[in-house]
Amino acid sequence: MTLTAQSPFVRIRRDLHQIPEPGFAEFKTQRYLLDYIASLPQERLEVRTWRTGILVRIRGTAPKRRFGYRADMDALPIAEDTGYDFQSMHPGYMHACGHDLHMAIALGIVTHFTQQPIADDLIVLFQPAEEGPGGALPMLQSEELADWMPDQIAALHIAPEYPVGTIATRPGILFANTSELFIDLTGKGGHAAYPHKANDMVVAAAQLVGQLQTIVARNVNPLDAAVITVGKIEGGTKQNIIAEKARLEGTIRTLSADTMKLVKSRIEALVKGVEAGFDCRAEIDYGSNYLQVYNDEAVTEELMAWLRRREDVQLVDCTEAMTGEDFGYLLEKIPGFMFWLGVDTPYGLHHAKLEPNEGAIDLAISVMTDYFTWKSRGE
Ligand SMILES: CC(=O)N[C@@H](CCC[C@H](N)C(=O)O)C(=O)O
């Protein structure tokens, strides 16, 4: 597919960038996508909605299989600091994980196949709530997808660290198992000048954050990999009041289910220790958990061989990353792959200054439409 610098999908990405919404609240995003899809030739299209998500079927000319493609839709609670003239119009929210590009690319794919259909069916999923609490698993289990279940599925994720033109992937595990982590500590508040009459949850929380770091350093095999990140701490009400409550919010990442079990059991032991040591109560909530993203070996090796033959792509056989993705649930049931798409920007994912190079949009549409066309020809 030939795309120019005035690619409509760059404009679409910018429109979507302005209306970032949290998981399962992607109402304007869903409306925007539906309106765009309604503007396309309808002969081959069937559209279903599921919660704030959308399923699109593009009927093939002689379908024997269904290929699937998935894009995520939600944004993050980050106050944008890009300086774009198309900044987020939703204060405190930003597409800082590339889902605006992912959706624009998916619309490019839908557009292409409405004009140049292939033999097989293509199912394009616009999936809500990837950042949390997770839309992939309930969408996979939904009635709306049941009779459109793809035989093979693909997705991509932008990668700030690679130049435009680079695609990075690997057969097998690509992204980690994840579990959210919320710990609520309740002690006894009091006057700042009478610490002996209170149980200070700011001090307990500070100790616990330090202790949690020992799990990766001292309990996980150094040849394995795990991450515990505490991304948010809340506690107390005023500088001269001893805090009765504190809350830690974080995430756990591991490359195996067994290591996830080990990390959780060590967290529970350390939290019990803090309860005893600070004479307080603690509650742990693991929030939502995502399965690792595991690329089907045969399908991914075939994709990588095909990509090596393209002059516009530099293929990197990359290592695993400790990022998470609920696309892992789709890959557990449907063979397929995810790959990193280079977008060449100094700021990483989840950063307020993330400015992906939009040249990657056209490249990704071209790669994916050529790939599905090739696969459908059975070459
Ligand atoms: C690609 C990416 O950045 N994904 C997110 C997924 C979040 C999972 C869950 N809400 C958690 O925080 O554990 C990531 O943070 O890796």
Image: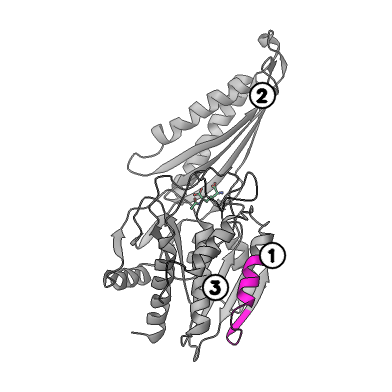
Q: Which residue is farthest bottom? A: 62
Q: Earlier in the sequence, mark 1 or mark 3?
A: 1
Q: Is residue 326 visible?
A: no
Mark 3 is surrounded, within 10 Å at the Cα level, by few (under 14), some (14 to 19) or many (20 or more) other residues, namely: many
Q: Amino acid at mark 1?
A: Arg
Q: Earlier in the sequence, mark 3 or mark 2?
A: 3
Residue depth check, mark 1 versus mark 2: number of the one nearer the observer: 1
Residue under pointer 1: 51
Looking at the image, residue 35 lies above or below residue 120:
above
Q: CA distance from mark 1 to mark 3?
A: 16 Å
Q: Amino acid at mark 2?
A: Cys
Please give the range of residues in magenta.
31-46
**Residue 26 spot, x, y in % from top left:** 66, 59
Total marks drawn?
A: 3
Foreground residue, 314 or 337?
314
Q: Earlier in the sequence, mark 1 or mark 2?
A: 1
For label 3, the SS is strand
Q: Do the residues bearing badges 3 and 2 touch, measured as CB atoms within 8 Å?
A: no
For label 1, the SS is loop
Residue 243 is left or right of residue 343, and the answer is right
Residue under pointer 2: 280
Residue under pointer 3: 124
